[in-house]
Image: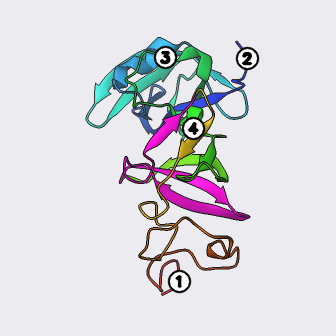
Amino acid sequence: MSKPQNPVQMAVIGAAHGIKGELRVKTFTGEPLALADYGPLYARDGRAFQIVDIRPANTVVVVRFKGIADRNAAEALAGTELFVDRSMLPDDGEEDEFYHADLVGLEVRDDTGAVLGKVVAVHNFGGGDILDVTLGGRKGVLIPFTQAAVPQVSIAEGFVRVDPAAAGLVDDEDGGGPREEDFDPKGRPRGPSDAGGNR
């Protein structure tokens, strides 16, 4: 198989471990050792990585990749993200479980079915999944991927339904839907007034 056409990130390579080319790897699989079950892993540039050995180590796994035999070669790989194609992943999850790759590209609709925008990415900064969406010309609007904020996901029909109030898209108390003027592309992101500022 060549470079994934619909990539799903499975892991990221961390620091070298020892002097024989082993690496500490943070996995995004439910079972960390299952990383070896997906066949070759691919970097963004198309390089393939084949796992020869894998073992648990605290919060990560220690991996030896084919062709990486010394510490210098291992150190050069630090920070490399590893992917497989979406087709390599099973579809037997729970009804309310989704791969991030399945959510990207879905329309974002409100309670009336009106299209507000599109999911462009899914992030997790440690506090849970967050949908990164474009709304009314604004890029980078973040919506928590919770049952309250996103009560419906329909992969088959190609959309997610959001509750504008729970998603933090409106400030009004009446719970009304978002209006065009709510989406000022030059407006500051919601949050503390000093968020992102220099100190």
Q: CA distance from mark 1 to mark 4?
A: 31 Å
Residue contact between numbered discs 3 and 4, judged by CB atoms under 8 Å = no
Residue at 54%, 64% (x, y): give it. 177
The residue that mark 3 highlights is 91
The image's mark for residue 17 is none
Q: Nearer the viewer, mark 1 or mark 4?
A: 4
Q: CA distance from mark 2 to mark 3?
A: 22 Å
Q: Amino acid at mark 2?
A: Ser
The residue that mark 1 highlights is 197
Q: Residues within 10 Å of mark 4 (few under 14, many from 20)?
A: many
Q: Residues within 10 Å of mark 3 (few under 14, many from 20)?
A: few
Q: Quadrant of residue 133?
A: bottom right
For the N terminus, which image quadrant?
top right
Q: Against 193, is 15 above or below?
A: above
Q: Against 141, is 30 above or below?
A: above
Magenta stretch: give its range.
Answer: 127-155
SS at circle 2? loop
- Going from N to C along the chain, the mark reached first, 2 or 3, is 2
Q: Amino acid at mark 3?
A: Asp
The residue that mark 2 highlights is 2
Residue contact between numbered discs 3 and 1, judged by CB atoms under 8 Å = no
Residue 76 shows in the view: no
Residue 169 rendering spot, x and y as whole percentages: 52, 67
Q: Amino acid at mark 4?
A: Leu
- Going from N to C along the chain, the mark reached first, 3 or 4, is 3
The residue that mark 4 highlights is 103
Answer left or right for 174 relative to 134: left
SS at circle 1? loop
Q: Amino acid at mark 1?
A: Gly
